[in-house]
Image: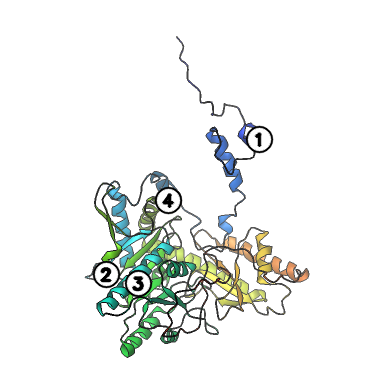
Amino acid sequence: MPLHETKDEGALDAGTDVFASALSSQILPKYRIPEEHSPTEVVYQLLHNELLLDGNAAQNLATFCTTWSDDGVHRLMNECLDKNMIDKDEYPQTAEIEARCVNILADLWNAPAGTTATGCSTTGSSEAAMLGGLALKFRWRERRRAQGLPVDRPNLVCGPVQICWEKFARYFDVELRPVPLEPGATGLRAHQLADYVDENTIGVVAIMGVTYTCDYEPVAEFSAALDAIQAEHGWDVPIHVDGASGGFVAPFLHPDVVWDFRLPRVASINTSGHKYGLAPLGVGWIVWRTADLLPADLVFNVDYLGGDMPTFALNFSRPGGEVIAQYYLFLRLGRGGYRRVQQACADTAQYLAGEIAAMGPFTLLYDGQGGLPAVSYTLTDPAGSPFTLYDLSDRLRMRGWQVPSYPLPPARDDTVIQRVLIRHGVTRDQIALLVADLRRAGEHLTATPPPAPAADPRSGFHHGGPVPAAGPPSRTATSACPARRAPPPAPE
């Protein structure tokens, strides 16, 4: 008797073209789930084609995030699709690998010998920053309560930080005190701290890789200024370092810059594994210099996943593949490999800086040396230029390039700049093509000036951006951070 195989009614018959299938002749459902299933090949191809409308990640020079990964990362990510990072009892080896990564970062950031640093992975540097902020707030509150002092007016002092810090302040009832930029400055300066820090300051945020311009804030100078403030007023104010990008650049390119746990006042550091850590999207890290700096009240013990596990996070279930990929990169690259990758990026950034400086209409704000592998610049004569940087961004988009234009934060928000980030996978040849397109775009806009801009000429980059600055606070101010409209966001 012959054998017969059953057929899946939704399968694509051999010889049937994907684009001749029933689903391909329809507008895809957008607001209701369809009644019946469709063949895998058809759905995949239709979605694949629709996603071609997205920008090309290789030309996205606005993002700090990883846009290229090697085959080993892809294979490990695929093998870890079913691993839940939170379930450390079911996936103990994944938990062990997370712990190894925390130890590697504590060592990379010079945690003091003979002590026990502590930390965890997160979904990104924004969650990690918020966890660091919560630890600052809880420790400040514990100290104040022990002294019998009020705890209703916590504040956090910072320079031009990324939008996650405004979220932290608003979500967790902390007054954010962003310090205005001084003329010529691209970040917070140490001497400004005395006008903003007081007894209710839970901490100062220092940025290793300012979102706008990509240079480093002087963390060691912040520490010295806070030492002087403590000597005068008795206020012991810790530093949290937002190393979202610089945490994976400074140790390899600028080892002599003292910014990390070598400074006793640095209590915690956050970073993005999925930025210059080179891991795929979805992983960040937070490390405290010693375990006692993470208040026990913030840690929850969960026993309903099979074991009694401590957890500190803003979310719960999340994939473990990105953590595995991070460890893979630590092993595959090592210190030497990370140094070579970051140096190649820095060299390309400096090449771009030289080309832009030679073009004529631009003045460099940051030339790619001493900070992140990036370049930022402004028009030399904005008032006399036949075009704006917003016009230039739009023109470059016609060639696929995503190069953001935006104003600096208060009190330098009259200066509009562009920024180009050089990441792993952005090649010298690619940047040479960008330079040629920049030159052609400038020539076209000069020969054919665009119409006068509308009231708001800004291009649409809608990533996480910076927060507005305020003047020096009153020592008796009691209001929490008000809802304010931020300036146009600098892409993350």
Mark closer to the observer (1, 4): 1
The type of residue carrying mark 3 is Lys
Disc 2 is placed on an element classified as loop
Question: Neighbour class for label 3 at 10 Å: few (<14), some, many (≥20)?
Answer: many
Which residue is depicted at the point 61% across and 40% down? 28
The type of residue carrying mark 2 is Thr
Disc 1 is placed on an element classified as helix
Query: Which image quarter: residue 253?
Result: bottom left
Report, in whole angstroms, how far the alpha carbon at label 1 lies from the one at label 3.
57 Å
Locate residue 170, reporting x and y percent. Answer: 45, 69
The type of residue carrying mark 4 is Val
What residue sits right under mark 3 in the picture? 137
Kindly indicate whether the residue at mark 3 contacts the one at mark 1 (C-beta within 8 angstroms). Answer: no
Mark closer to the observer (2, 3): 3
Mark 3 or mark 1, which is nearer the start of the sequence?
A: 1
Mark 4 or mark 1, which is nearer the start of the sequence?
A: 1
Report the front residue among 274 and 73.
274
Question: Neighbour class for label 1 at 10 Å: few (<14), some, many (≥20)?
Answer: few
Disc marking residue 25: 1
